[in-house]
Amino acid sequence: MCTDQSQDLTGTGCSCHRPSFGFSRRGFLKAGAAAGFLGGLALPAFAQDAMPTPNSISPDEALKRLMAGNARYIANTSRNKDFSANRAARAAAQYPIAGLVSCADSRVAPEIAFDQGLGDLFVVRVAGNFVHTDGLASLEYGVKVLGMPLIMVLGHSSCGAVAATIKVVKENITLPGHLPELVDAIRPAVEIAQKSNPKNLLDAAIAENVRYNVELLKKATPIISDFVAKGEVKVVGGVYNIATGTVTLL
């Protein structure tokens, strides 16, 4: 297992390597073969000729939908209120328009903040919204198999994980349990933020943590970097303001 996160995510001989699937991504989706992937990569012969799926949209269109949904949420005009709707269709397949790397903070709920229905977002959550190998593998699955065209790294105001990292960096203290591993993942962003001598180090580090992980994902080989290079996937970053509900793109 890699100990260096940047090596982990750029594919230099670590466990984040995943095999390249030799079939049509969109066809795979329409055929409902995502379940087959989990059960042994069985692919129906007709998958290659399948029609476009509900999430066969451009990265820009996916981002537009997210931000329009956030505007509705802020205005308290959310459309997604009946969560029983389309339950049967969701049982058959999923077609997320975006993957999110979100903090585990209980005050952050991406589906609500972006006013998206169940099945629209493929969310990886971890305190501090950073990318690790397990999260990367999930996002690779979302891109390669589920066909999502957009990935957003979503930080948020008053992030406790970033605040704890700042405390460790400034005071050179050691946290208990596995918390040092979390701190090590966020530390590079805090150190970058410190160099600019910001008035509010926490806010600056939260933003830098988002930017840092956006860049890691753009370069994450062998899957995501390839889709980014071809323009089929876009990786963006944003910060959610818990008090106002506003998502600001970085």
Image: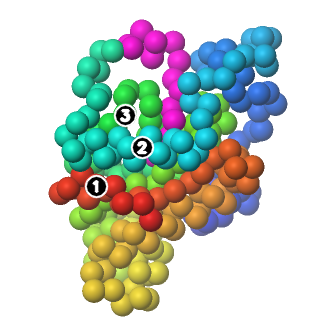
Foreground: 172 or 244? 244
Relative to 50, is 214 above or below? below
Q: Amino acid at mark 3?
A: Gln
Give the residue displayed 56% in from the left and 30% down from the top: 55
* Residue 57 part of the magenta segment: no
Q: Which residue is mark 2?
A: 66
Foreground: 186 or 209? 209
* Residue 92 part of the magenta segment: yes
Q: Amino acid at mark 2?
A: Leu
Give the residue displayed 78% in from the left and 16% down from the top: 49
In this picture, residue 192 sits left or right of residue 150: left
Does label 1 or label 2 sit earlier along the sequence? 2
Does label 3 or label 2 sit earlier along the sequence? 2
Relative to 76, is 246 above or below? below
Foreground: 1 or 21? 21
Foreground: 22 or 174? 22
Cα–Cα span, label 1 and label 3 = 15 Å
What element does badge 1 sit on? loop
Q: Amino acid at mark 1?
A: Thr
Percent across and percent down for residue 167 are 28, 77
Q: Which residue is mark 3?
A: 116
Percent across and percent down for residue 93 are 53, 18
Q: Residues within 10 Å of mark 2 (few under 14, many from 20)?
A: many
Marks 1,3: beta carbons within 8 A:
no
Marks 3,2: beta carbons within 8 A:
yes
Cα–Cα span, label 3 and label 2 = 8 Å
Does label 1 or label 3 sit earlier along the sequence? 3
Q: Which residue is mark 1?
A: 246
- Determine which of the numbered discs, if any, sits on residue 161 in the image: none
The quarter holding residue 244 reads: bottom left
Image: magenta residue range:
86-100
Q: Quadrant of the N terminus?
A: bottom right
